[in-house]
Amino acid sequence: MWIKLIYPRWPKLEGQTEFHLPPHGPVTFAAALPREIELSFVDENRSPLDCSDRPDAVALSVMLTCQVPRAKAIAAAYRRCGVPVIAGGIGVTLHAEEMAGACDAVFLGEVEGRCDQILGDLGRKELRPVYDWLREPAPIELVGTARRDILDYSLYTYRGVRMVDLVHASRGCRFDCAPCPVGYLGGRVFRPRPIEKVVAEIESIDNPRLFFVDNSLCQDRAWVEQLLTAFLPLRRSFISHPLDSDDEILDLARRAGCWYVYQAILSPSPAIRERIRRYQAHGIGVEGTVILGTDDQDEAAIYRLVDFTLELGLDMAEFNVLTPYPHTTYRRALAAEGRILHDDWEKYTGDKVVFEPKRLSRTRLQDLYYYAWEKFYGTAGRRMKMGALIRKVILREQAQGASAAGEGSTKGWTQGGSAG
């Protein structure tokens, strides 16, 4: 059986430096398929998609709300020719009813351990419209090493430097942040993978640069300490979402290879200032994810917030307009107040105002979004900041590679990690 796996294209964030990370959803799905399946993969963000072929089935991996319109168009093109289309991923789970109407089958939730059922139904031409495992998470022990062999890594470079590979060490999130759908998607229970499985996956990746896409590394301090300790001999550089900001964890994270973190910034609070100071004191860079348009922000508050990002000395910043994604507490509140402007999902990208702000006009909020990017990056530009950040990690890799050579080992530092 030949399955064509497609990752639909999506519009990049306006103002963001354009780069492309290898997508994580498709390689995770591929790992759950039996090896006897003939699998081809197209990331439409990096390669043109030809819909004239006739695979036995098309599988759509949809991560983002803004991918939904394109996913529906691809499904329609193949279904017109009699090719069955199956879809899954975060974006499908958030838009289950809409996607079910556009595909032959959708699966909601986690796919590990469930592929035999879907493939059996596909072979018998008895696909169900919906396979709903949303409230039945797969046993975390079933999550194996992602199938990165389906990727063409020449497509995922920036200025000749190979981009990070994405890895997850846990699923679920015990926090319930109003703008975030993770609690709906993965449950409110933190589910860490066995550390030996995470280590085995890292050792299988011939890239010294990783991005741990876990929702948060602040959920179980003892487990994170064990995880970071296991990283020490692996000699990799990694990015993550926030870490506990106590000195012991941050020192361990730096020694384990953490070179920068993504940190959400909603207000110019002393707590955020102190957290970022601690990261920087331990040699860990910071990219601020700055949210614009919360109900407590007026125009003056946004000006103060942008000034605050400059004061912090962030390595990078990504400014986002708060967006009411489906199945979030925030969307429910806005819907109850009649403040959602439309459901044109292609514009739910984080750079467009799709709701009625409380303390300023929608037009002014959109203008302030552009102002924030221009003010933070100034004449230096985003590419220069990005280049400086990449230079930091390459210098770190070279230093650690030299140290490893002195110890008689260069594993992980000579494979696929150099510029050029």
Image: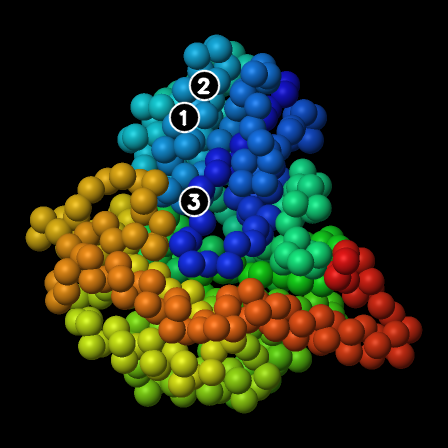
Callout 1 crowding tier (Cα within 10 Å): few <14, some 14–19, many ≥20: few
Callout 3 crowding tier (Cα within 10 Å): few <14, some 14–19, many ≥20: few
Q: Nearer the viewer, mark 2 or mark 3?
A: 3
**Given the image, on which type of amino acid does mark 2 rest?**
Ala
**Residue 77 bears which disc, if any?**
2
Tag 3 secondary structure = loop
Alpha carbon separation for disc pair 3 and 1: 15 Å
**Residue 296 quadrant:** bottom left
Q: Are the residues tagged 2 and 1 within 8 Å (C-beta)?
A: yes
Position of residue 375 measured from the top left corner of the image (x, y, whole percent): 38, 73
Residue, far front: 379
Quarter the N terminus occupies: top right
Q: Decide if residue 379 is in sight here.
A: yes
Tag 1 secondary structure = helix
**Given the image, on which type of amino acid does mark 3 rest?**
Pro
Tell me: 340 left or right of 391: left
Tell me the residue that label 3 is attached to: 11
Residue at 27% across, 46% down: 326
Residue at 53% across, 24% down: 58
* 87 vs 20: above or below: above
Compare residues 378 and 4 and report the one nearer the observer.
378
**Residue 73 bears which disc, if any?**
1
Position of residue 398 measured from the top left corner of the image (x, y, whole percent): 78, 74
Residue at 51% across, 12% down: 124
**Given the image, on which type of amino acid does mark 1 rest?**
Ala
Query: Which comes before the other along the chain, label 3 or label 1?
Result: 3
Alpha carbon separation for disc pair 2 and 1: 6 Å
Residue at 39% across, 28% down: 72
